[in-house]
């Protein structure tokens, strides 16, 4: 075996160890590891994005109900529906 082949195999082995190390990490750990080396201006953008995601409406709250109201009104506000609910 040539010396360069031996170095290649050592390098390949070290690379595989790094890959397996990352495979065991959770998403939060990977994010933290990545941002450790970011310069400050990028960190401000990351922070802005995280805050945006936190504030982003999920669509399950009152906004979703308000948006669906006109569609539901077409179905519910009919004489047939009123008659069906008269006994309650």
Image (tube, helix red, strand yellow):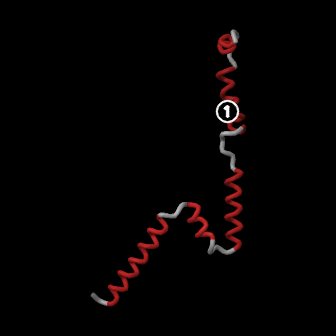
Question: Which residue is at the front of the view, 15 or 74?
Answer: 15
**Which residue in the rendered view is the most extreme toward the left?**
1
Q: Measured from the top left, where is residue 61 in percent x and y?
A: 69, 39
54 versus 87 height, above or below: below
Q: Quadrant of residue 86?
A: top right
Asked if residue 2 lies left or right of residue 44, the reply is left
Q: Residue at x 71, y 72 (%)?
A: 41
Residue pointed to by mark 1? 68
Query: Dot 1: what SS?
Result: helix
Question: Which residue is at the front of the view, 14 or 40?
Answer: 14
Q: Residue at x 69, y 50 (%)?
A: 56
Asked if residue 44 lies left or right of residue 37, the reply is right
33 versus 57 height, above or below: below
Asked if residue 28 lies left or right of residue 77, the reply is left
Q: Measured from the top left, where is residue 20 in percent x and y?
A: 44, 68
65 versus 2 height, above or below: above
Q: Quadrant of the C terminus?
A: top right
**Which residue in the rendered view is the most extreme toward the bottom?**
3
Q: Quadrant of residue 16?
A: bottom left
* Count of marks overlaid on the render: 1
Question: Which residue is at the front of the view, 13 or 37?
Answer: 13
Q: Measured from the top left, where is residue 75 in percent x and y?
A: 64, 22
> What is the crowding at mark 1: few (fewer than 14 residues within 10 Å), some, or many (at least 20)?
few
Q: Residue at x 29, y 89 (%)?
A: 2
Asked if residue 47 lies left or right of residue 16, the reply is right
Q: Measured from the top left, where is residue 58 in percent x and y?
A: 66, 45
32 versus 11 height, above or below: above
Q: Quadrant of the N terminus?
A: bottom left
Q: Quadrant of residue 31?
A: bottom right
């Amino acid at each position: 075996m040539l010396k360069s082949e031996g170095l290649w195999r050592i390098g390949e082995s070290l690379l595989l160890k790094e890959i397996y190390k990352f495979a065991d990490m959770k998403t939060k750990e990977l994010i933290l590891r990545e941002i450790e080396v970011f310069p400050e201006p990028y960190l401000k953008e990351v922070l802005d994005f995280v805050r945006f995601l936190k504030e982003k409406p999920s669509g399950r709250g009152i906004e979703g109900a308000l948006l669906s109201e006109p569609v539901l009104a077409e179905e519910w506000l009919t004489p047939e529906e009123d008659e069906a609910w008269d006994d309650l």
